[in-house]
Amino acid sequence: MKTLLTALLAGLTLTGCMHLKGQVVQPPGDRPLPTAVLSIGRPDGVAVFGTYPVDNSGKFDFYIDQLEATNVYVYDGADDPAATIMHIDSTHLNDHMKVLMRGAPKKSGFGM
């Protein structure tokens, strides 16, 4: 068991694991966006390698391979991803991120 764990840790080190941790907030006032989802691969495309919904406080905490760093997106899971999709530049990825984005527009009951 110890050998397997050592091999797994060595594999993570060799591939260049990247820790993504932070919070998705929306203006005004940096309110948490609890419906946000981070995606590895464009969520409205054919190659989504993983999705990571935030918690009720808009916070997230996960690891990705460094090779995936150019394919990180965020969107509001309350609507079609294409309506709110935003690419996160790899230079902004770290373990203390603050992602500012507008949530999906609220659907009013007017005219229904």
Image (cartoon, rainbow, N blue to C red):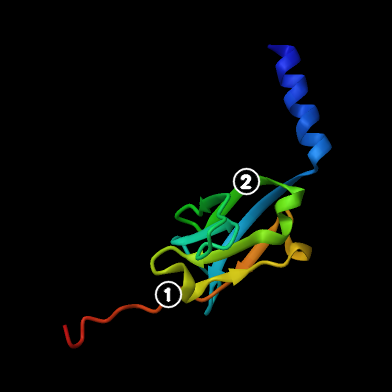
Left or right for 88, reference 85: right
Q: Which mark is residue 55?
A: none
Q: Are marks 1 and 2 in contact (CB under 8 Å)?
A: no
Q: Which mark is residue 104?
A: 1
Q: Residue at x 56, y 57 (%)?
A: 39
Depicted 3 relative to depicted 38: above or below: above
Q: Position of residue 14 (x, y in %)?
A: 83, 36
The single residue placed furthest to the front in the displayed view is 46
In the rendered view of the protein, which quadrant contains the N terminus? Answer: top right
Crowding near the residue tagged with mark 1, few <14, some 14–19, many ≥20 C-alpha atoms within 10 Å = some
Left or right for 6, reference 75: right
Kind of residue sitting beneath label 2 = Phe
The single residue placed furthest to the right in the displayed view is 14
Depicted 69 relative to depicted 28: above or below: above
Q: Sequence order check: which comes first, mark 1 or mark 2?
A: 2
Crowding near the residue tagged with mark 2, few <14, some 14–19, many ≥20 C-alpha atoms within 10 Å = few
Would you name the residue on which mark 2 appears? 62
Q: Secondary structure at mark 1?
A: loop
Left or right for 46, reference 62: left
Kind of residue sitting beneath label 1 = Ala
The single residue placed furthest to the bottom in the displayed view is 111
Left or right for 101, reference 65: left
Q: Secondary structure at mark 2?
A: strand
Q: Residue at x 50, y 65 (%)?
A: 44
Q: Position of residue 92 (x, y in %)?
A: 74, 64
Q: Position of residue 11 (x, y in %)?
A: 77, 31
